[in-house]
Image (tube, rainbow, N blue to C red):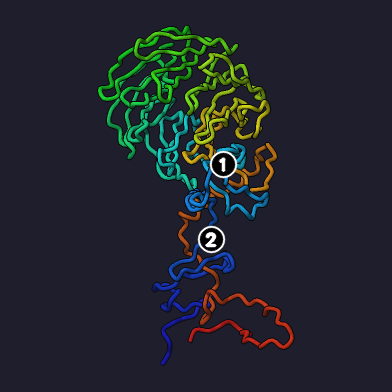
Amino acid sequence: MASNYNRDDGGHFNGAPGGNMGGRPRQSGNIPFSKMVFDGKRMRKAIQRRTVDYNHSVAKWMQERVRFRDRRDTRFLRPDPNFIVNLLPPVAYLDNPINAVTTKFVHTSTNKVRYPVNVVKWTPEGRRLITGSSSGEFTLWNGLTFNFETILQAHDSAVRAMNWSHNDNWMVTGDHSGIIKYWQSNMSNLKMFQGHKEAIRDLTFAPSDTRFATCSDDSLIKIWDFNTGTEEKALTGHGWDVKCVDWHPYKALLASGSKDNLIKLWDPKTAKNITTLHGHKNTVLALQWNQNGNWLVTAGRDQLVKVYDIRTMKELQIFRGHKKEICSAKWHPQHERLLATGGSDGSLMFWMTGQDQAVGEQETAHESNVWSLDWHPVGHILVSGSNDHTTRFWTRPRPGELSSGKFDSSQQYEEEQMATKQEHDQKQQFTELPPFRPNVMPSQNKIEPPPFRPAGARRKYWPEAPVRNF
């Protein structure tokens, strides 16, 4: 009986699997088997994604600290990358803050439509990162694998300020047109109102979360009732744009920095100015209270980072090292002596009180202004948002690994190429498979030479041809 199947040039039979009537698709051989992973369902390239998972280090720390009589009993790491498995979270090295300096580049995250990243903020549990851009969009990035999760249009103008309440239930944001919005943890917007006539530059919550304060380019600092969204007090005293404001961690005390080069301390109950610090010779762009409540760090366009002790109302220390104006400053969440600053030239520097020189530096962390910095709640990752439209993640180096102090632009190129390739692979439909070989298992198509066997060893069977399907 004659066969109804006609063989084509590719080794397939029309009507048989791989022909025009369905079954296995024809194969062109463009993708070699050595670069494929066979899961029984489809052929797909293996993708390697960087991950910085802190769960192992936290679990190891929980196990080991039971045996410690004191926190000083913590073991020191050997200076070898192989001992990274013994690396503990920053809270385990409270006596050695240098272990929390994050100069190791991990990943660059960029939106498809690029806009300057004005503010970055971790979610309270540290699982995601939220970035606010000049387009008014929120972008959520995964906190472990750093991949994109979702994006939403939050504001009609550029997002300038963002902060979480202390109870971790609410997030308040402000934009360039003076609009204030309330957000829940599921990114649902519940309230919106006009707060200022000009751009909102910063906002901060009171320790009780019943009130929050905002500062704006209209030279005003306003205190709001969170529940009703009504203005309680307006603090007047600055003669120009107010660039930053921060509420004391446990006292009724506000600190603000302005374009008039002044740092003012306020009593939010009476709306009066307590004192004024004349420490900078140019605009104060960033300030933050330390977790101990005694230190206040300030930074500005005069290229200086200053730490004030409010118990004496004097400068505790001055850090010099930035070559251009300083745009952002952030204390470490676990080590009260450690802080990070970002400059307008894209540099990233780490400082520690008691030392005059920087303990860590990345001269070319970004190509433009570093507008915002934020530490992961655990303290092992630092995120920077820049005017060069990128968000970058920085982590601790491996034990014994030395940092060059300069970010290689080729790393960014490789990251962008990898991100593009991963996106392409996810969308690509694999309609072309390797050349068809009848009666050959896909995982057994490559023949390798037999392994070395010492004299007298028992001979093992080594197939001379591919294993066939029976």
* Quadrant location, the N terminus: bottom left
Left or right: where does residue 122 sit relative to residue 388? left
Q: Are marks 2 and 1 in contact (CB under 8 Å)?
A: no
Answer whether residue 56 is visible to the viewer in this image: no
Q: Which residue is denoted by mark 2 in the rendering?
A: 46
Label 1 crowd bin: few (<14), some (14–19), many (20+), radius 10 Å = some
Residue 97 pos. (x, y %): 59, 37
The answer to whether residue 57 is above or below residue 349 is: below
Nearer to me, 102 or 64: 64
Between 291 and 127, the one lying in front of the other is 291
Residue that lies at the very extreme toward the bottom in this rendered image? 1
The residue that appears at 66% across and 50% down in the rendered structure is: 78
What amino acid is found at the position of numbered circle 1 in the picture?
Answer: Tyr
Residue 97 lies, with reference to residue 64, above or below; the image says above
Q: Is residue 305 above or below residue 220?
A: below
Foreground tag (2 vs 1):
1
For residue 267, side relative to residue 417 (left or right):
left
Residue at 40% x, 24% y: name it. 250
Residue 414 visible? The answer is yes
Residue designated by label 1: 93
